[in-house]
Amino acid sequence: MIAPSRFVKLSALLTSFIFLQGVSAVCASGQMAVGSYFFQEFTGPSGSFDVFGGFLMANDCGIIAESTATQDSNTMCVASAYDDGVSVTCDSNHQPIAAVDTLGQHWTCSPSSDGSCDVGGSGGRFDVLACCNRS
């Protein structure tokens, strides 16, 4: 489990990356995006560990909800990783197929290769994996 102070730093970092990208439409109008992020935390000259999380994103690249950051690469697909009733259901390949947002609305998701809000760089990855329609 990541210490709460470290999670706040990661959450702020994720939000900063998104704002640096500028506002863009990640999915079609009325859709919501689901994705994952990964950061490598360096602990010394030759040590590091990986941190993973998932998110729901509005069409303007704003974060709707974010999972708890953990060292489990499947965190995006773990319902208990989110607050406020948010969940993401994944298929056997860990790709999002459905989601529930903060208002309890159900969404059906399809794979997306849209990179409008994606952020990369050394030591991390931020990927939109699916665009979702209300069920």
Image: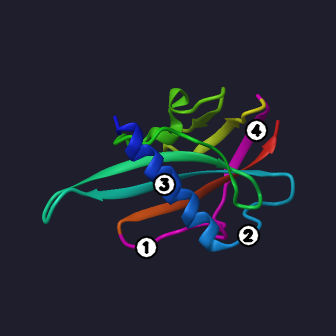
Label 3: state its secondary structure.
strand
Number of labels in the image equals 4
**Which amino acid type is marked by label 1?**
Gly
Q: Residue at x 47, y 46 (%)?
A: 8
- The residue mark sitting in front, 1 or 2, is 2
Question: Bounds of the magenta span?
Answer: 104-122
**Which amino acid type is marked by label 4?**
Trp
> Residue at label 2?
23
> Residue at label 3?
37
Label 4: state its secondary structure.
strand
> Residue at label 1?
121
How packed is label 1: few (under 14 Cα within 10 Å), some, or many (20 or more)? Answer: few
Q: Is residue 110 left or right of residue 49?
A: right
How packed is label 2: few (under 14 Cα within 10 Å), some, or many (20 or more)? Answer: some
> Residue at label 4?
107
> Is disc 3 in contact with disc 1, using a CB cutoff of under 8 Å?
no
- The residue mark sitting in front, 4 or 2, is 2
